Amino acid sequence: MSYTIEINGIKHDVDAEGDTPLLWVLRDILNLTGTKFGCGIGQCGACTVHANGSAVRSCQLPLEAVVNLQITTIEGVGETEIGRKVQERWLTLDVPQCGYCQGGQIMSAAALLTRTPRPKDEDIDAGMAGNICRCGCYTRIRAAIKHLGEAQNA
């Protein structure tokens, strides 16, 4: 079946089954490989994208569910002011170690900072819950988010 979906502001006609996870559409059909496969069950956060601005797990989101949504991936998040600032802060603070999970981390952080411009520790905990970093970069991730929250409201 053919579906028209909007990814990073561009409409794409996709021929796939409606229950195909968005992750596979992004990676295998649209060649947007920045969104990573981690666990496949929505627990690790490596596949996080934005659906109408909210962080969602693309491995659990069927293609047919995104037809009327605006999807943003790590390739497109830098087009938003918050997304660009998050990416810049990640580089400035040298947040990633291996980097595999960082696309999902950045997507969750950008959604958090959009929803909660001055997050407290408990907001960060809730907003980043389920984003696993095997390298343990949590201290630098938290520092980047806190700095952005402070800078936005200075």
Image (cartoon, helix red, strand yellow):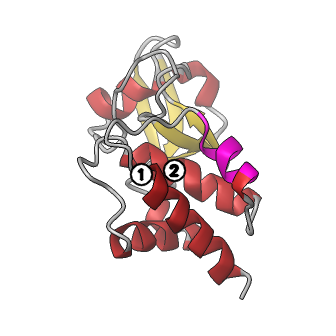
Q: Please identify the residue farthest to the left as the structure is shown.
A: 98
Q: Position of residue 26 (x, y in %)?
A: 37, 34
Which residue type carries mark 2?
Met
The answer to which of marks 2 and 1 sits earlier in the sequence is 1
Label 2 neighbour load within 10 Å: few <14, some 14-19, many 20+:
many
Q: Position of residue 63 (x, y in %)?
A: 52, 22
Q: In the picture provided, is 10 more to the left or to the right than 94?
A: right
- Quadrant in which the C terminus appears: bottom right
User: Which type of secondary structure does the marked residue at label 2 adopt?
Assistant: helix
Residue 28 part of the magenta segment: no
| Residue that badge 1 annotates | 74
The relative height of residue 114 versus residue 151 in the rendered view (above or below) is: above
Residue 83 visible here: no
| Residue that badge 2 annotates | 107
Q: Position of residue 75 (x, y in %)?
A: 37, 54
Q: Give 149 or 33, whichever is nearer the viewer.
A: 149
Residue range (magenta): 122-129
Residue 125 part of the magenta segment: yes
Q: Are the two marked residues, 2 and 1, in contact with CB atoms closer than 8 angstroms? A: yes
